[in-house]
Amino acid sequence: MTEQKTVTVNMGPQHPSTHGVLRVVLELDGETVIKATPVVGYLHTGIEKTMENKLYYKAIPCTDRMDYLAPMSNNLGYCLAVEKLMGIEVPEKVKWARVLLTELTRIKSHLVWLGTHALDLGAMSMLLYTFRERESIIDVYEAVSGQRMMSTYIRIGGLAKELPKDFDKWVRKVLKQVPQGMQDYIDLLSGNQIFINRTKGVAVISAEDALNYSLSGPMLRGSGIKHDLRKASPYSGYENFDFEIPVGRIGDAWDRYLLRLEEMRQSLRIVQQALDGMPEGPYRAHVPGVVLPPKEDVLYKMESMIHHFKIITEGFETPRGAVYQAIEAPKGELGYYISSDGSNKPHRVRVRPPSYINLGALPKMVEGRLLSDVICAIGTIDIVLGEVDR
Amino acid sequence: MEQTSLMTEKIRDFFSSRFADAVISEDNFRDQQSFYVKPEAIFDICQTLLNDAELDLKYLSDITSLDWLGDEEAEKGRFEVVYNLYSLTHHNRLFLKVRLQEDNPRIRTVSDLWAGANCMEREVWDLMGIDFEGHPDMTKVLTADELDGHPLRKDFPLTWEQPKFTWNKDDPPEVIK
Amino acid sequence: MGLEEKIPDSIILTTVDKMANWAHKRSMWPLGFGLACCAIEMMSTFAPHFDLARFGMEVMRPSPRQADLMIVAGRVSMKMAPVVKTLYEQMPNPKWVLSMGACASCGGVFNNYAIVQGVDRIIPVDVYVPGCPPRPEQLIDGILKLYEQIEKESVKDKREEWGRRIG
Ligand code: SF4
């Protein structure tokens, strides 16, 4: 009898398939994973602490840098939370524009996920295709805000500036290009035997486990639980839109692949509806002293200029209390818990990071499976380290 | 809205019938129902809620913590732990809040009820220094190993440095605490 | 290449520096590792729209031992700093470092306890590319600047410098 021995293997933090700087310590018996321990924190930025030290307005750029694949969703979550705290109601047009942009963000995030996930599983060229379509969404970002990624376009009480005149043109380009691209992905992957073999029945998580691990987003829906905050607790006017929530059957990586593709299709539907029905109106709520006045007014009106100056230098007083606002970000339930002590800076900003909590289920998904399934499991969770570590 | 207030009534009934002496106070801010409860009771409350089919507050959305140092709230206890529960059928939220004393803050873990609480509690320990009794792995998760202390506490400095360009020379910048 | 036919049986005269620099410059292999948001822009730079392959560097090496350019794309946290340093030390000479983004160059918006205020605190940097995140064109420009810098290098000076850096 030979003695049985296990080997401990370290994966990451610099590893091409860990999507950044995730480190996983694996205990292996042959090729079977006995124990997997994710080690995070290699990108810990102290964003929550930094936000406590900034005025409410000036904390918005920090939110972009958390989930950098979906910056607008983060902006939206934070701004909705502050609006809830202040009791601000935003104009109809702002709601529609926000919905449109966050749905584009969802597509953008899923595109990067698809590219990198397929890359990890050996389909090198997928990344090149998805980044091609991603550029068209980035063009929209650039058209509205002037920045390619960190747009900080959604502000407290409205938007940073008016939508550009050729906004229509850019969005229509996305609506034309992305479905074509998606057909390419389906042709490349859905019938690809290697891809199917590596995802079907891999990284399975059952419905009870998904709930027990507090998973959210595609990870929860992949296991067959129909829960989407856009339908369950609508925010920002999602109740006006017509869309479906796709669910998976058994909760494996293949289900989640199909689910995310379908989500992209539904997002395109929402974008189309939002573009066609975009109402007219101001792009910022009129709440003097709290919401920045429109830039045009600042240049010509005395009061607006004073308000602008005061908000930028001193911020605004807030009521005491704590609010929680959750949105359905591409990765799951993204929540902002803002506690205010009445001053002009948040007392505490807590971000409920969907991918950090989803990552907690990684050991459950891979233990007892093969080493190569770990790669697939990390990919299918769709983590983004900026958000895991904050 | 009506649904929410109905559920709030039910939750209130639940507490008054079963945990009347565990509830310290109740708060409703911007339609968000929260209950301050005694730290000893948190595990029992969570366990009962988990088995309660009617309220169905079974989804643990988040666990977080606050530090009230230097605020009038600190009288009731410096640290606050917030449990955020969600109902997948009724779509309402319940916040359970617990106040802990300044020295040696500790509370019973709920990670044996929800596996997802494991990583949330670990993060609270790392960033705020609240000990969860009975947690399987109460170690650092986000911060660097060399870092002493818990960064989200109010007495931990943000530690900013005066921006200065070093041109790759050995010229340690000034650190302001 | 056809060069052989044009100059049959002849000798090309050049200096060692020129020859070495030309070779260094034309086959730059970056280390494929990303830290934060900037890494996504770095990926866009390699992707079709901007296509860094035009400048002869489409191969990303996953192992530091095969790479000679390190693009520090993103913020370096205190926990990551030793890892970055190790990666740098594992790269064989000659090697260059490009610091991409405000965070890697000087800490960016995160002036706090968790972030190293500029990667130049731990490893020597050759080119800084500002921006948050820099546009792909900016990154390409930074790389071209690095090429210019390499052209001016002399192998002799480099040697001495390597001695210093390692020592
Ligand atoms: S410079 Fe900006 S984009 Fe780059 S890593 Fe820092 S925060 Fe992210």
Image: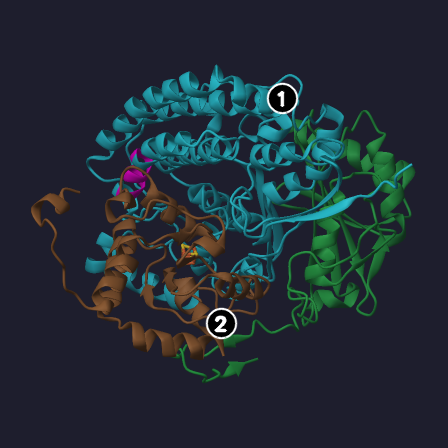
Chain colours: A cyan, B green, C brown
Front tag of 1 and 2: 2
Question: With C139 as the anchor, is C32 left or right in this view?
Answer: right
Whole-number angstrom distance, CA of label 1 to CA of label 2: 49 Å
Dominant SS type (magenta) = helix
Residue at the image position 62 percent from the left and 45 percent from the top = A356
Dot 2: element: loop
Quadrant hosting residue C108? bottom left
The amino acid type of the residue labelled 1 equals Lys
| Local crowd size for mark 2, using a 10 Å CA cut-off: few (<14), some (14–19), many (≥20) | some
**Is C103 left or right of B54, judged from the image as shown?**
left
- The furthest residue to the front: C9
Estimate the x, y position of residue C106 in percent, counting from the top left: 41, 69
Give the residue pinned by disc 1: A226
Residues rendered magenta in the picture: A136-142
**C104 shown above or below C45:** below
Residue A134, percent across and down?
Answer: 35, 35
The answer for which chain carries disc 1 is A
Report if residue B89 is visible in the image. Answer: yes
Depth check: give the residue in front, A30 or A310: A30
Q: Return the residue nearer the eye: A71 or A203.
A: A203
Q: Quadrant of the C terminus of chain A?
A: bottom right
Image position, residue C97 (x, y; %): 39, 64
Dot 2: chain letter: C
Q: Looking at this view, is A258 or A210 the one in front?
A: A258
Amino acid, disc 2: Ile
Q: Which residue is mark 2?
A: C122
| Residue A105 is a magenta residue | no
Give ligand 1's quarter of the image: bottom left
Q: Relative to residue A42, is residue A235 depicted above or below?
A: above
**Residue at point 37%, 18% (across, down):** A183
